[in-house]
Amino acid sequence: MGAAMFDHLDSLPPDAIIAMMQQAQADGRAHKVDLGVGVYKDATGAVPIMRAVKAAEQRILAEEKTKSYVGTTGRAGFRDHVLDLVLGADHPACASGRLASSQAAGGSGALRIGAQLAFSATPNATVWVSTPTWANHVPLIGSTGLRLKSYPYYNRQTLGVDYEDMLAHLDAHAEAGDLVLLHGCCHNPTGADLSPQQWDRLVPFLNDRGLVHFIDLAYLGLGRGLDEDRYGLRLAARDCPELIFTVSASKNFGLYKERVGLLGVLCKTPEQAGVVQSQLGAIQRTLISMPPDHGAQIVERILGDGELKRDWLDELAEMRERMRGLRRMLSDALDVQGGEHIARAVTDQNGMFSMLPVTPQQAERLRDDHAIYMTDSGRINIAGANAGNIPRVAEALLDVLS
Ligand code: LMR
């Protein structure tokens, strides 16, 4: 009898976002507009390589002497620079000795290591995620064995955050030791962020209940600005005894396929940080052994060089401003009778995404009849539009919504 190992496997549906990315790429209609996958596009529709990234790569090519292993938690220089970037070099946590960290294979790799750490420490904890959240949060975190549950977040009628419902739900259902996954800025998939005042109330609210902040910061600098976008993380790192956070360099450095991310863990004491640091290395070793280096080296060079860093920040601001400009244009075009609340939400929301009140059937009509791609949930990536096609996008939206 021959082997039959795969006889019982079922074929799985493709990931919805990735499948749509491929569907949009294969669409031959010249007027197609791809508002699907979360990658930044410039006015020509290209996913650009940032200037500072190219410059750093050239230096790496000229100067790199070895391709030897980097170690299980990656480059110390990368970790220090990224921690300074996301917390601010003057943040008390940076000099406290209470931080453990690991380089990771993208923000996703960081989420997986962070979740594994949480599972090792508290296997019975629940991770609370927003409704909705990034679709991949659930399998990524759930694959560790941690249980996930949802809290109310986005209101598809008002297109804003149901903040009081969120707090009431967590108050009623979350238990001390549970984790609450929060999007640091540019909420994916809705674009609806917590205001500074809402963070101010949320952090002590969670602390008082013994709930652990788990902050995913994947879009730093692409929302309102560097300081605005890291407000919640800085506050949590100031006031929480313990905190897990993940950072992605996919979007703000445009390093998607290089897989660059960081996991940060704030612990009660430097001794505990040492323990956690050893755990992070051991977890990464069991998952992928060691993180990929090229992208992390690019980030380290940019953040460690005054001139490259300035240029990177300038280009990041250009990207942010382009998206804000597109939001204003789309908002103006939607600001007609019946579209006013969508128009307002589009400018209130941050980052690449907005979630429009489009049904899966309407999203399909937009794809089939108008060659406009967005996820079935109604999420649009505003960076996929441009000044030329926004009037058509608005018209098609108002058409399917009417
Ligand atoms: C997205 O949400 O579109 C991106 O983060 C890409 C992905 O991997 O889903």
Image: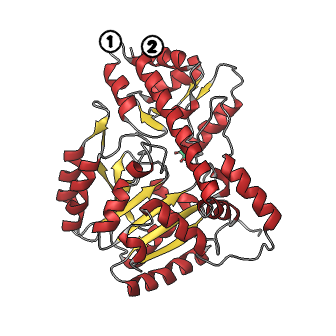
In the picture, which quadrant includes the C terminus?
top left
**Above or below: residue 312 compared with residue 289:** above
Q: 257 and 137: which one is in front?
A: 257
Residue at 40% x, 39% y is 190
Farthest residue toward the front?
307
> Residue 85 at what x, y percent from top left?
49, 60
Q: 91 and 338: which one is in front?
A: 91
**Above or below: residue 330 compared with residue 256:** above
Q: Amino acid at mark 2?
A: Asp
Left or right: 315 in relation to 140: right
Residue at 82% x, 63% y is 62
* SS for dot 1: loop
Q: 383 and 166: which one is in front?
A: 383
Left or right: 135 in relation to 37: left
* SS for dot 2: helix
> Residue 206 at what x, y percent from top left?
24, 62
Q: Which residue is mark 2?
A: 399
Kindly identify which numbered label has been placed on residue 337. 1
Cα distance, mark 2 to mark 1? 12 Å
Q: 191 and 124: which one is in front?
A: 191
Q: Are marks 2 and 1 in contact (CB under 8 Å)?
A: no
